Image (spheres, grey):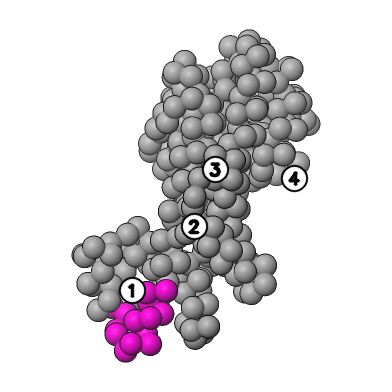
Amino acid sequence: MKIGFIGLGNMGGPMAANLAAAGHDVTGFDMADVAIEGVQLADTGAEAAKDAEIVITMLPNGAILRAVAAEIVPVMSTGTAFVDCSTVDVDSARAVAADATNAGLLPVDAPVSGGVGGASAGTLTFMAGGSADAFAKADPLFDIMGQKAVHCGASGAGQAAKICNNMILGVTMIATCEAFALADKLGLDRQKMFDVVSTSSGYSWTMNAYCPAPGVGPQSPADNGYQPGFASELMLKDLRLSQQAAQSADADTPLGQHATALYEQFVENETGLGTDFSAMLPRFEKRGRS
């Protein structure tokens, strides 16, 4: 299959490489000077998209997605699938999908979960929005780049699923870090707390699979000096998207709102920038009750 891939950064680069390794003809474009094994590089996004059967984008935000779509949609052939794997606001995803549909394309918004490790290993999870026909055309590629793809509904549903999931993730990580900091002050051994909580009603992904306490539970960024698996600034981006969506939908999300404010403080005014989002634990360790 002839594939255009626009956005060859930490996520897009490995995804494109996996498609090429599976035997597909991949032409890529990125604003940065990159080299991706098996991927032929184009001089522009439009060149990468022209004559492709499927075009995949992995971009930083909704404004850039809209700009790239304005460039590539006019050169794409009728019936081409336009699969956006970026994490962007729902409004941008739906606006781009509407423009693509009007041009005779098959749009899919398909943000991912799994991080850079999942992109390299081909174990991402895709949350997809779009028509059944569009999803069916993209699904074989999801099988190469990931381990699971869920068709969540119409255009925008993929982005909605991603931001709801990550709002839960951000709130849960804060609660997990708060609990460890409280356990410390109560004189409770961290390992004993993990042994109880990980098999009790406090069970969560942030406790059991991504524990923020070094030396406790499975290997996690906490055991590597909080070098990012999922950076705090990316969590802040996703939480902000959740609150933008909540504002648009008139939804009451007080915990999501408070988590956004905490990560904003952590990233912009404290030491969170460039650290894993689980580095909230050392932040809470140092703080008393205010």
Which callout, 3 or 4, points at the residue further toward the start of the chain? 4
Q: Circle 1 sits on which residue? A: 216
For label 1, the crowd category at 10 Å Cα-Cα, with few meaning under 14, some 14 to 19 and many 20 or more, is: many
Q: Disc 2 or 4, which lies upstream in sequence?
A: 4
Classify mark 2: helix, strand or loop: helix
Q: Is residue 217 left or right of residue 227?
A: left
Residue at image mark 2: 254
Which residue of the protein is positioned furthest toward the right in this rendering?
Answer: 43
- Specify the amino acid type for callout 1: Val
Q: Is residue 178 above or below residue 43?
A: below
Tell me which amino acid carries mark 2: Pro
Tell me which residue sits at (47%, 59%) in the image: 255
What secondary structure is the stretch in magenta mostly built from? helix
Residue that label 3 marks: 250
Residue in the foreground of this view, choosing between 51 and 274? 274
Q: Report which residue position mark 4 lands on.
A: 32
**Quadrant of the snapshot with the N terminus:** top right
Q: Are marks 2 and 3 in contact (CB under 8 Å)?
A: no
Q: CA distance from mark 3 to mark 1?
A: 40 Å
User: Which circle, 1 or 4, is nearer the viewer?
Assistant: 1
Point out the stretch of residues depicted in magenta: 178-191
Which is more foreground, mark 3 or mark 1? 3
Q: Which element is circle 4 on? A: loop
Q: Amino acid at mark 4?
A: Ala
Q: Position of residue 184 (x, y in %)?
A: 37, 85
